[in-house]
Image: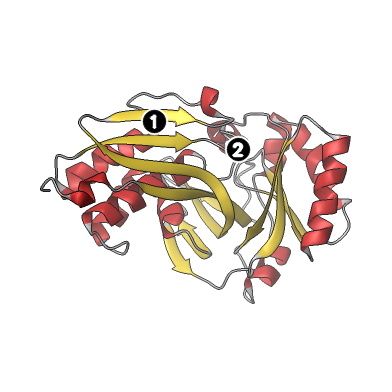
């Protein structure tokens, strides 16, 4: 790329929190993954990735959860940059800043969302279409949740969760995400799954399918982090709740509400009851 005005453009991309409205585990696969059916949805808020041209590559982390993130070559943001270059070429250098606003190891996308936001920024920068098959291949190689986070909209995920069919979402539904600030190992939770196939996700509109569904990893997560059970109980007790569920492998749980007012009352009540818990009042599309 020639040294033009465009070289100074700074790109800012939100890495929204990923929610599993339902997560059905169907089987263990020979490759070490699990066969899943899941309803993905995304909050309007999350981490923020900033991409700026520079003379040399540099990765920095800011935000309330910065201390939990390694700023080294193993970070998914750094790996996303390297993988994009390998697929599309180019020798431009960047300063990438990750504003880490979401708790880590929490079932809401985390590094996958950050990697996807990095890929979207690089694609914008280099004129690569988001539906480019090479970009999807890069996302799949980075992790099972990265393609869904790259898509960034409601979808039915099958296979490892990376075979995606876009669906109608829940329409900017008020939501409250809460985490007891316990790190939960995804590997540990999947290892405790009982191996029982309780069936797939049913038909209907997205909210109806979610309400009829479940998170098959919840019992395992509760064994690893008992606070998950307490948290779900607190959410269910709130006024105006239409759905409560643990997301992913935990420990973040969420509630969908009938109105912004009831969501905000719940947020205030929970903050008083459990001031150490992390919360995010948002909307889910």
Q: Would residue 24 be seen by someone viewing this image from the given angle?
A: no
| Residue that sits furthest to the left in the current view | 2
Assess disc 1: are there few (<14), some (14-19) or many (≥20) residues with their C-alpha within 10 Å of its C-alpha: some
Look at the numbered disc 1 and give the secondary structure of its residue: loop
Q: Is residue 282 left or right of residue 130?
A: right
Specify the label residue 75 is tagged with. Answer: 1
Give the tally of numbered discs: 2
- Quadrant in which the C terminus appears: bottom right
x, y (%) of residue 195? Answer: 60, 45
User: Which residue appears at 52% of the width and 64% of the height?
Assistant: 156
User: Which residue appears at 58% of the width and 56% of the height?
Assistant: 44
User: Which residue appears at 46% of the width and 53% of the height?
Assistant: 149
Does label 2 or label 1 sit earlier along the sequence?
1
Assess disc 2: are there few (<14), some (14-19) or many (≥20) residues with their C-alpha within 10 Å of its C-alpha: many
Do the residues under discs 2 and 1 have CB atoms within 8 angstroms? no
Front residue of this view, candidates 127 and 258? 127
| Residue that sits furthest to the bottom in the current view | 204
Look at the numbered disc 2 and give the secondary structure of its residue: loop
Identify the residue under disc 2: 106
Mark 2 and mark 1: span between their CA atoms?
A: 16 Å
| Residue that sits furthest to the front in the current view | 5
Specify the label residue 23 is tagged with. Answer: none
Q: Would residue 100 be seen by someone viewing this image from the given angle?
A: yes
Front residue of this view, candidates 63 and 43? 63
x, y (%) of residue 76? Answer: 38, 36
Q: Is residue 229 left or right of residue 79?
A: right
x, y (%) of residue 212? Answer: 72, 66
x, y (%) of residue 45? Answer: 58, 51
């Amino acid at each position: 790329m020639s040294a033009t005005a465009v070289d100074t453009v700074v790109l800012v991309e939100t890495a929204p929190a990923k929610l599993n409205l339902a997560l059905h585990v169907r089987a263990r696969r020979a490759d070490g993954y699990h066969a899943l059916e899941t309803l993905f949805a995304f909050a309007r808020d999350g981490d923020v990735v900033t991409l700026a041209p520079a003379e040399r590559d540099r990765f920095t982390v800011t935000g309330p959860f910065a201390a939990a993130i390694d700023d080294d070559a193993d970070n998914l943001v750094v790996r996303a940059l390297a993988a994009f270059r390998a697929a599309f070429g180019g020798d431009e250098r960047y300063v990438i800043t990750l504003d880490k606003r979401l708790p880590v190891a929490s079932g809401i996308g985390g590094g996958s969302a950050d990697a996807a936001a990095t890929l979207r920024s690089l694609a914008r920068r280099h004129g690569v279409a988001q539906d480019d098959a090479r970009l999807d291949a890069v996302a799949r190689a980075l992790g099972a949740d990265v393609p869904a986070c790259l898509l960034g909209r409601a979808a039915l995920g099958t296979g490892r969760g990376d075979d995606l069919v876009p669906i109608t979402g829940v329409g900017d539904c008020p939501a409250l995400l809460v985490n007891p600030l316990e790190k939960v190992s995804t590997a540990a939770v999947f290892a405790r799954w009982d191996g029982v196939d309780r069936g797939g996700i049913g038909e209907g509109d997205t909210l109806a399918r979610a309400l009829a569904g479940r998170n098959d990893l919840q019992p395992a997560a509760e064994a690893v982090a008992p606070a998950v059970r307490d948290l779900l109980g607190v959410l269910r007790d709130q006024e105006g709740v239409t759905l409560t569920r643990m997301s992913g492998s935990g420990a973040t749980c969420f509630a969908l509400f009938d109105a912004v007012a009831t969501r905000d009352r719940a947020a205030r009540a929970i903050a008083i009851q459990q001031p150490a818990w992390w919360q995010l009042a948002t909307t889910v599309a």
